[in-house]
Amino acid sequence: MTYKDSYYSNIAKLSNIGTNILFQYDAPDGFRYVVFHFWNAISYNVRICKSPKDSLDIRNISFIKTYHYDINGNKSEAGFFCKVNCTDIFDSTSAKKVNAIIWEQFSYRLSHLLTGFTLTIERLKKEVDLLEKNLHNYDIDRISIDKLINYEDPVTLSTIEIIRTLYINKSKYNKGESFNKNLTFILNTPNHTLQKTSIDDKKYVEKLIELDKQNKLSDYIQESIIFFYEVYENEKTLKQQ
């Protein structure tokens, strides 16, 4: 299990929380290793076989290719440069030797996985589709605000807040850039994950209830949904180019 801060800080930049990553590297000890990085939270460093002879020149800089599998089932590739003889970045320890400090580091990363809302456009689209359906029923008085916000479900609240933030900042949205790059700029979330607490959600619920009393909640959500769908169609166009 790899645990070096430098490793985790670097690997975290390559993907979102919840993403699984796989890569291999050749170490100066003459062996090839495969790293299984689960949920962008914990890694297992597994020795596989002896390295090919042509991969043992430790004077060179190695580009390590990484394979990503995200929470939506999408596959992608990335990578990073590393000195082959810089084994410190891949330093690891046996699971039996995990101490309080290492466990605390893992718990911190795991807490981000459990409390974060990973902002992929595919996931957000599914949530917005459901929100739009419920909003229609809310507008014709079939459901109350309780059902509309799914009884204060954190994912529903995050969805409303995210698309509203995008709408408020629509003048800053660069349609020539990807959805993820725009999120990094607008939401200031470098790993495309929104971190919130129960206190944050409670305050937001109070705001939505007040909008409901003022008969402004429907417009608040509807105009945000409309802009998100514009963003979604723009993303599809960018991927086709």
Image (cartoon, rainbow, N blue to C red):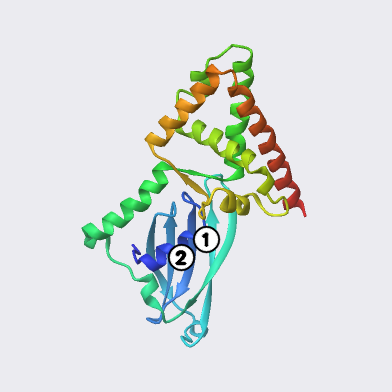
Helix, strand or loop for disc 2 = helix
Q: CA distance from mark 2 to mark 1?
A: 7 Å
Q: How many marks?
A: 2
Q: Residue at x 43, y 60 (%)?
A: 36
Q: Can you identify the residue that label 1 sits on?
A: 14
Residue 10 is tagged as 2
Q: Residue at x 39, y 68 (%)?
A: 6
- In the rendered image, the vertical position of residue 66 relative to residue 164, given as above or below: below
Question: In the rendering, at what x and y percent does residue 3 appear?
Answer: 34, 64
Residue placed farthest to the top in the image?
141
* Quarter where residue 94 is shown: bottom left
**Residue 54 shown left or right of residue 45 in the figure:** right
Question: In the rendering, at what x and y percent does residue 229 appear?
Answer: 69, 37
Q: Where's the N terminus, which quadrant?
A: bottom left
Q: Where's the C terminus, which quadrant?
A: bottom right
Q: Residue at x 69, y 45 (%)?
A: 171
Helix, strand or loop for disc 1 = loop
Asked if the residue under mark 1 is in contact with the one under mark 2, i.e. CB atoms within 8 Å, the reply is yes
- What amino acid type is highlighted by mark number 1? Leu
- What amino acid type is highlighted by mark number 2? Asn
Question: In the rendering, at what x and y percent does residue 235 appear?
Answer: 70, 47
In the image, 148 versus 161, the foreground residue is: 161
**Residue 104 shown left or right of residue 219 in the figure:** left
In the image, 124 versus 27, the foreground residue is: 124
Q: Residues within 10 Å of mark 1 (few under 14, many from 20)?
A: some
In the image, 17 versus 166, the foreground residue is: 166
In the image, 50 versus 81, the foreground residue is: 81
Q: Residues within 10 Å of mark 2 (few under 14, many from 20)?
A: few
- In the rendered image, the vertical position of residue 193 relative to residue 11, given as above or below: above
